[in-house]
Amino acid sequence: MVDPLDGTKEFIKKTGEFTVNIALIVQGKAALGVVYVPVSGDLFYRDLDGLSYVESDASRVERRGQIAQIHCRAVDGQKITAVKSASHSNEETEAFLRKYNPVQSKSAGSSLKFCLIARGAADLYPRLGRTMEWDTGAAHAVLKGAGGNVYRIDTFEELEYGKEVMDNPHFVAASNGLKLTQG
């Protein structure tokens, strides 16, 4: 699954928060993923061993950038950092976030929100608005390899891919250590 320009609105606004996403879906699950940030040169990926990494300054052809394995941070239920869409947040999202009482809230564009959780800079990203499978597949795989996952908000089951209709249900991306609540 390929999304050659995730974060079209951020691209148009020239914020630099857009990505190129490539995912391999196996039996409905996000298995491998690559998220490339052209402006920064950062390359996030999940490898064949199921581990996730970030390569900083991967755009330098003459040498590879610095590679580091990434992990979701241990979640302190009293000090949750939430991330939300820079261009698509809504009142339903704000109501969902209030249940977790985040001490900090960040905004980011495109699949970078998943990458913030994967590299330990945030804990929770709810999306209560329209997205498509190609918007989430690659970053979902990266997040899984870092110790997180993406769950449907209605059932709290892992988000699946390859459905007949490619719209995603509302979801929450989170570190596996975060206790999610329904209702």
Image (spheres, rainbow, N blue to C red):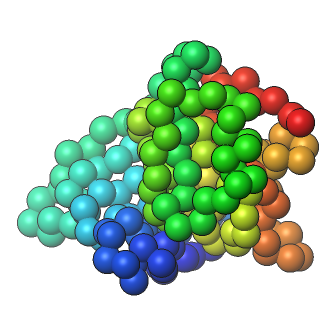
Nearer to the camera, 40 or 21? 40
On the picture, is 48 further left or further right than 65?
right
Residue 102 lies in what quarter of the image?
top right
Q: Residue furthest bottom?
A: 12
Nearer to the camera, 74 or 36? 74
Q: Residue at x 49, y 40 (%)?
A: 105
Can I make out residue 145 in this image? no
Q: Residue 140 placed where, x, y %?
A: 61, 52
Q: Residue at x 75, y 53 (%)?
A: 92
Q: Residue at x 86, y 76 (%)?
A: 165
Q: Residue 81 placed where, x, y %?
A: 51, 33
On the picture, is 110 further left or further right than 44?
right
Can I make out residue 113 in this image? yes
Nearer to the camera, 148 or 171? 171
Label total for image = 0
Task: Give above or below for 6 relative to 58.
Answer: below
Quarter containing the N terminus: bottom right
Q: Residue 35 placed where, x, y %?
A: 45, 61
Task: Give above or below for 28 relative to 12.
Answer: above
Q: Residue 75 placed where, x, y %?
A: 56, 21
Nearer to the camera, 46 or 56? 56
On the picture, is 123 further left or further right than 106?
right
Q: Residue furthest left?
A: 62
Quarter containing the C terminus: top right
Q: Residue furthest front?
A: 91
